[in-house]
Amino acid sequence: MSAAPMMAQDGRQRPEFRYDAQHNQLGEKTMVNLIKAAAFAAVITVAGCQTAPPETPLEELLDQGARAELAAQRCESFTSLRGDRKLQDAADSIYAKARSMGADQADIEAARLRARQQAGIRDTLIGNEATCDELSILPPGY
């Protein structure tokens, strides 16, 4: 049982297409595996961008201030206005303490950059709301 070749409107012969459920399932499995591989590669790439942990108590203090400041700036939909003010006040207080310990503006900017990078990674992995929950935790004493 042979079928006549299909002809296009311009007279050229078109390849015959037959739906084959078995090959379609293989194609779907391949596509699913490719999507899984791409997702895994994205997670590995993001995990490879982890910033280094703070090396000194001053860096830890600056990181706490930067996280509080970042939470006040970008998490207002998850905290109240009072919460935002409290986070910003804590950040200002932490920065003042860090300056008294010898930190300068470049140190503060570096801490802000680390906080933004870490928050971006956390957003990708766990979502914005969970990241804001983590950022909004004040250090002890604030």
Image (cartoon, rainbow, N blue to C red):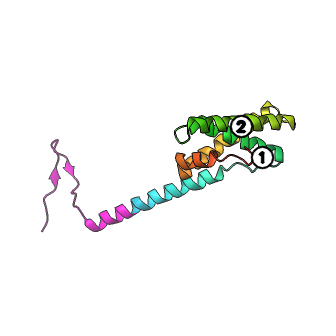
In depth, the one of 111 and 38 nearer the eye is 111
What's the residue at 32%, 65% (across, down)?
25
Badge 1 crowding class, 10 Å Cα cut-off, few under 14, some 14 to 19, many 20 or more, is some
Left or right of 3, for residue 31: right
Q: What segment is highlighted magenta in the picture? A: 1-29
Quadrant of the image occupied by residue 34: bottom left
Residue 14 colored in magenta in the image: yes
Percent across and percent down for residue 18 are 21, 61
Residue at disc 2, secondary structure: helix
CA distance for labels 2 and 1: 13 Å
Q: Residue at x 67, y 40 (%)?
A: 68
Residue depth check, mark 2 versus mark 1: number of the one nearer the observer? 2
Front residue of 21 and 94? 94
**The N terminus - image quarter:** bottom left
Q: Residue at x 47, y 59 (%)?
A: 36
- Front-most of 68 and 124? 68
Side of 63 where 46 appears, left or right: left
Q: Earlier in the sequence, mark 2 or mark 1?
A: 1
- Quadrant that contains the C terminus: top right
Q: Report the side of 71 relative to 51 (left or right).
A: left
Disc 1 residue type (three-letter):
Glu
Q: Which residue does the numbered mark 1 point to in the structure image?
A: 60
Tell me the number on the disc at residue 91: 2
Residue type at tag 2 = Ala
Q: Is residue 65 above or below residue 30?
A: above
Residue that sits furthest to the top in the current view: 105
Mark 2 and 1 residues: CB-CB less than 8 Å, in contact?
A: no
Which of the two residues, 62 or 78, is positioned nearer the viewer here? 78
